[in-house]
Image: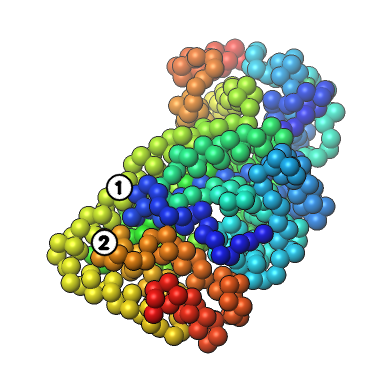
Amino acid sequence: MHKCDLCDKPAVLNELIREKDDQWRQIHLCEDHARAYGYPGSGEIKSEDLAEASGKVKKRTTGRRKRLASCDACGLTLASFRRHGLLGCSECYHAFEAHLEPLIGRAQAGATHHCGHVPDQKDAHIDRRLNRMRLLKELNDAVSTEQYERAARIRDELHSLEECGPEDSGETSAEAEKEQADHGSAQ
Amino acid sequence: MVRPSENGPWLGESGQDSDVVVSTRVRLARNIDGVPFVNKATDADRNEIVGMVRRTPLFAADAGELDWVEVDELDGCDRRKLVERHLISRQFADSEASRGVGISRDESLSVMVNEEDHLRIQTLGTGLMLHEAHDRIATINRELESHLDFAFNPRWGFLTACPTNVGCGVRFSVMLHLPGLRITEELDRVRRAAKDLNLAVRGFHGEGSESTGDFFQISNQVTLGVSEQDLLETFAGDIVPRLVDYERSARQLLLDKRIRNLEDRVHRAHGILASARMLEANETINLLSRVRLGVSLGILKTPSVREVHRLLLHVQPAHVSAITNAPLEDNEASRVARAGMVRGIFGG
Ligand SMILES: [Zn+2]
Ligand SMILES: [Zn+2]
């Protein structure tokens, strides 16, 4: 597990964030720092706040995601992955996510989310929560930019995430959607 | 290290449902966070992985469960022997660069380091023992987790070099002996059902191998979106018992309707094994399979299932070579040596 970018505690948030210039960057934050920067909680992340955090992140993952044909962490190219079928490192899962989604779905009978054992039970609840927050944020983006197909897909992911395991917050999916709607109307 | 004269734990005397279930295996794929996967790892990375794994208590000199075997230091025959004993994969035996395997004294637990994933942990046992094998591997996993950070992502679960292995990374597998279903020509139906249930069906020697001797390895393919516990309940509680029932019904049908034909197959196989002067490996496994069926149904009083199992392992090329000093390749000398070993048991 990664350490927090700002202190020595273990990171509970491993997140790709987009900066102003459309650069993507991987950040790792501990529970305290994640909360301090608005994760989870108020929902919206302020880009100024994240600039401080991401400024301290090592320049490991700075590729342009849209044109990303290789993994910045290990150098694996999409072409090479397609030839050999093996990924080069954990970061490849972010770099090639769009290509991996359908592939994994086909191999895994349509499953989209892990729901078994997690390395540390405490972190896992936070992880699941953060994952949900991320999806809610993406859903918000998708709705506000009228990408309805994408929104439907994200909604499906949210449902499968909630069906998956014990939710720590006890919120139902109806409440989650209401939360999403509230964020939407606040904009 | 490798004791060719002994049975592997997967070919023990008996076990639950051992008339049909030969052995049980549970495997776990894990990678260490922050180090490239094996196919992108440098020599230094690979050595680091080996070092990290060997510093865990599993390998502690006094109380550790596992002995370390450096695969590069083994000759070709010893590597093949580990493959035949199901302790390492063929791919692992043949690959290059820093890699090794930790093996428990009774061979029921092994950890391959730097195979396709950093760690491939497996437990092996005789007969149907999925719950015990799973409990053991879960314990080992927790122990490793307290010393190693495994690559994990909340969405995909445990990250693996091959993206289709993500999720809980657990593979439950049983080796089934299905001669009844083959003779009654029901195997295609079983294969179709297995496909619908997202199960992989492999042969005696694992991936890509033929179904020598009507032995089949059945395992789950889906590892994402389902917990280890649910996988286990489905596999152990539903799928395997159903397959065992199919096979038993097929055998009963043969006993009821085709007893002479069945006795002829069994005794003919016994006769060849008791008197042949030269035997090829797969031919021998096919004959032993018929004898195993005969013993399970009470058509034969001897040898015991244990002896049949021991032979199933020992007639494979590297074992024949290790026991008799015959050459590893298939030629007259190795066939003669194999036939001699078999006659020793079948009393020819
Ligand atoms: Zn921190
Ligand atoms: Zn990579």
Q: Earlier in the sequence, mark 2 or mark 1?
A: 1
**Image quarter of residue B321:** bottom right
Q: Residue at x 60, y 24 (%)?
A: A121
Find disc 2 in the rendering and name its residue: B298
Q: CA distance from mark 2 to mark 1?
A: 23 Å
Amino acid tagged 1: Arg
Q: Chain of mark 2?
A: B
Above or below residue A146? Residue A79 is below
Location of residue B99 in the rendering, given as x and y in whole percent from the top left corner:
72, 56
Viewer-nearest residue: A180 or B83: B83
Q: Chain of mark 1?
A: B
The reply to whether residue A101 is in sight is no
Viewer-nearest residue: B320 or B196: B320
- Would you call the spot at circle 2 few (<14 residues within 10 Å), some (14-19), or many (20 or more)? few
Q: Residue furthest left?
A: B257
- Same chain under badges 2 and 1? The reply is yes
Q: Residue at x 37, y 47 (%)?
A: B16
Q: Which mark is residue B4?
A: none
Q: Residue at x 46, y 84 (%)?
A: B278
Q: Quick check: which quadrant has ligand 1?
A: top right
Circle 2 — which element? loop
Left or right: residue B43 compared with residue B125: right
Label 2 vs label 1, nearer the camera: 2
**Image quarter of residue B272:** bottom left
Amino acid tagged 2: Gly
Find disc 1 in the rendering and name its residue: B242
Q: Residue at x 70, y 40 (%)?
A: B63
Location of residue B324 in the rendering, given as x and y in whole percent from the top left corner:
58, 76
Q: Residue furthest bottom?
A: B332
Location of residue B344 in the rendering, given as x and y in whole percent from the top left corner:
45, 75
The reply to whether residue B140 is in sight is yes
Above or below residue B9? Residue B77 is below
